[in-house]
Every structure is written in C-alpha cells, then in structure tokens.
Image (cartoon, coloured by chain):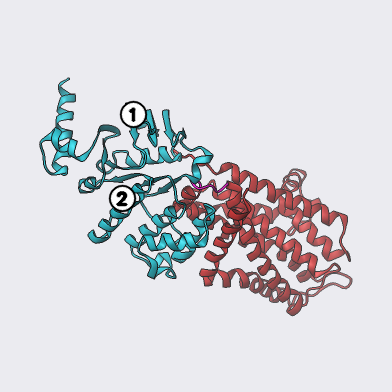
Amino acid sequence: MPGSTTRPAIEISDLVVRRGRNEVLHALNLSVTSGSITGLLGPSGCGKTTLMRAIVGTQIVESGSVTVLGEPAGSASLRRRVGYVTQSPTVYLDLSVRDNVRYFAALYGRPAAAAAEAIDAVALGGYSDQQAGQLSGGQRARVSLACALVGNPELLILDEPTVGLDPVLRADLWDQFADLAAAGTTLLVSSHVMDEAEHCPELLLMREGSLIAQLSPDELRTETGQSSLEHAFLTLIRTRTVGAQQS
Amino acid sequence: MNARIYTASTGRILRQLRADHRTVAMILLVPALLMTLLYFLYVNVPTPPGQQPLFDRIAVTMLGILPFVVMFLVTSIAMQRERSSGTLERLLTTPMSKLDLLGGYGTAFSLAAAAQAIVACLVTFGLLGLTTSGSVGLVVLIAVLDATLGVALGLLCSAFARTEFQAVQFMPVIVIPQLFLCGLLVPRDQLPQWLEWISNVMPLSYAVEALQQVARYPGSTAVMWRDLGVVAGFAVVALCLAAATLRRRTP
C-alpha cells in the first residue's frame, strides 16, 4: 500500500496449496489491512478455509510466502497473537461453557475473569453452567468464538462465524467485530453470504482457488453498476470469466 | 513445556471424564468384577500340595494386565475424539506444546488408573483372599505403572488411526500379542527362541515379571526395580513418539 505507514497484518505472495493431486489455491497474492475487518467471500468450496488455515499455519503449503504480523505464518510466537475460529464449532461438548472458555483462557495465560468477560461478550452469560453439547448450533459457535476472544488476539481469523445465527444475533456479532476492529484488532471474516460484505470495509472475493478482486463494497458496486452486492459479485464473476475465455 | 498449560489440560481432561459417569463407574469397577469372575473360575480347581494356588498365580498377573488393557482403550478413543472433533487442530494453534497435551492425558488417565488399581487390589486382596510374599503396595505401584504404559501406547496408536473404529482395532494388534507372550500362558523361558526374543522387547513381559517377583519374594527385588524401570522407559518413549507424530501442519 503506497503512502501507508502501517504494514499489512497479512501479506501473501504466490501462495500455492495442493491437496492430493488438486491444486486448491493458485498463486494467490493479497494483503489484509491492519486494524480493520476484511471480508473473505466466495462460494462454498472456493478455498476460503484452506486460505485461512494457511494464514493460521495449520495448512501444508506447496509454495509461496505467508507473512502474518511480520512473521512467517505458523511461527511459535504467533500462537498467542492469532486467534482462529473454525467453521464447525471446536469446543468440548462434554464441558460447561465456563470450563471451555476457562481452559482456553489458561492456554493463553489469561485470568478466569477474562473468561467471564468473553462469555458475556458473546451473550452467553446465562448459559455458563450448561454443557456445550446441550446448546444449539449457533450457541456452540459463540462458545467457540469466546474461546478465541479470551486470548485477546491481535489478529482474529473467523471462518463463517455467523452461519446459522438469527438475524438479530448476527447483527450483534457484527457490531462486536466492529468494536474489536476499532480497538485495533485485525479481523479476517469469511462468509459465503454476500449480504455480510456490507459490514466489511474491505473485501477479498474468491472463486475456485483464485482471488478475483480485492476492493471495498462501494468499489464493487461502482465497478459493476449493481446496487446489490450479490448481483455485483455475480456480474464481476461473469465479466472476469468471459474475459478469461476470450483472451 | 509450560506448567500452567499442562495443569490446565490435566484438569480439563479429568473434568471431561467426571462428566461421563458411566465411564467412571466402568473404569473403577470392571477390573474388580473381572477379578471376582476369575476367582469363581478357579474356586473348584484343586491345588496340589506344596504349590501356589492357580488363582493366586493368575490373579496377581491380571492385576497388572487389566489396567493396561482398559487404559489403552480409553486413551486411544479419547485422543481419537480430540482429533476428529477438530479440537486437537485448534489446540495446536494455541501456545500449547505437544508434550503439555500428551502429559496432561498421561497424568489425568494415570490418576484414574491409580483409583482403578486401588479398587481392584482392595477387592482381590481383601475379599478374594489373594496372598503375595511382597507387599500389596508394590502390586498397586506396578498396576498403576502398567496403566500409564497403556495410556502412553494408546496415545501413540491413536496417531495411526483415522477413525474410532480403527483405534479400537489397535487393541488386538498391540495388546493381545503381549498378552500371549508376557509369560502368563507359557513361562517365557519355555517359549521358542524367536518368540522369546519378541517377548523380550514387549513391555508387558517386564510388567508381568515384576508382579511375579512381588508374588514370590518378600520385600522388593533388584529384578523388580529393573523391570519397573523398563516399563517406565517404554512409557516415556511412547509418549515422546506420540508427540513426534502430532503435526501442527496437515495437508
């Protein structure tokens, strides 16, 4: 970013990931602005999760570089600075909400009080004593989120955090993400629902393992002449695909 | 390793165990009940004069073998669950080291195993009339160490299982041959040479020999301590190998 003094939170160049015989990410180049919410959007199966795993450092990569907060992805020192919430809630279903979040608090060296705060932040204060297995899918997802929030990470990677949540709760969560970003946390949030793009100052649009565009929602509208982001994304894909076939 | 993370993990695993009442009951009671079954199995078998009753010979060995088998199974399934639920991958993105996790599992399940061994020994010595020349305390100690070995091998084997079905199948592969060759069915010096060599590199052989030492001699013998050292060594090596097979990056 010319003219900018803050370095990007994530810088990726020529990232190639293979799974078995398939290349699932094709020479990706992108950067994620620090202290802001970046939306990672694209249809199911386009490589969003693989890209996130490469950023967290759990994905074996074929080639290319992934730099996170100034260090190579997966570095030991990043483990306390980066929080990752997987798409399916990864919490202990046989433990209470409180025990789950307290456990992750201990892993990050945070006090029990931080666990209570994180539980309140995801609006599960009344469910602390419930076993996670007895909660609904959306509630479990929020327990999973609380387990990441409790570490107070500089960078938060959220894989489809709002899937299956009711609209009110979804709006609450986006407000909370905005608060986190205002406090300096960088968020990378994936979704396959284009409506969610509205909450993100910056968008990464993916399709079939490639980055189609990196722009803001307004730029997306202007470029495509569409007012709905859903239509804008479709228009963008059609023009790019046609362009690719003609060349 | 980090003491805080290791302690928190041990506590978390114990809490999970406590939430599963039926498993707790089975861990505590199954070996004691099996010992009782064994007692009645031999109750009518006459003991030739001057010889040790058959029940005594087999029971003392079983006190070491049963905790080994039970803890091997419980641990390999527990670890497999951690893997398939995605929590393992998540834990490995946190500041936790692999040995913190495996040490936590080892400690938590060994505590459960200690409770199990104490119940089994109380029943066998107290109610079923088993007698040994050495002390009951040594039998408990060996039984707990055997269970720890089962935990360590279970952790290692779960790395090679992709599903819980596969994890269960490791029991006949890892446990049954050791059961055959450990000296319970045939004294090890009467095995064909090549089988004796194999039995020499199996940890359960040493566990059984240690128990036989306690049964035969008052006080602790040098052979018994050496055997315990071998069993502990196997457990530590299995734990370290298990840590080496945990991958932070996966395809």
* Left or right for A226, reference A158: left
Q: Tell me residue B206's x, y (percent).
A: 76, 53
Q: Tell me residue A83's x, y (percent).
A: 43, 47
Mark 2 surroundings: few (<14), some (14-19) or many (≥20) residues within 10 A: many
Give the quarter of the image for residue A57: top left
* Mark 1 element type: strand
Q: Nearer the viewer, residue B7 or A218?
A: A218
Residue B96 shown in magenta:
yes
Q: Nearer the viewer, residue B28 or A30?
A: A30
Q: Over which residues does the magenta segment extend?
A: B92-97
Give chain B's shade. Answer: red
Q: Nearer the viewer, residue A236 or B159?
A: A236
Give the quarter of the image for residue A40: top left
Residue A167 shown in magenta:
no
Q: Is residue A94 visible?
A: no
Most distant residue in the bottom direction: B127
Q: Which residue is mark 2?
A: A178
Q: To which chain does the residue with label 1 belong?
A: A
In the depicted structure, whether residue A34 falls above or below residue B34: above
Q: Tell me residue B155's x, y (percent).
A: 59, 51
In the depicted structure, whether residue B220 falls above or below residue A194: below
* Left or right for A146, reference B166: left
Mark nearer the N terminus (1 vs 2): 1
Say which amino acid is labelled 1: Asn
* Left or right for B47, reference B29: right
Which chain is in cyan here? Answer: A
Q: CA distance from mark 1 to mark 2?
A: 26 Å
Q: Residue at x 49, y 54 (%)?
A: B82
Q: Residue at x 25, y 56 (%)?
A: A171
Res A29 label? 1
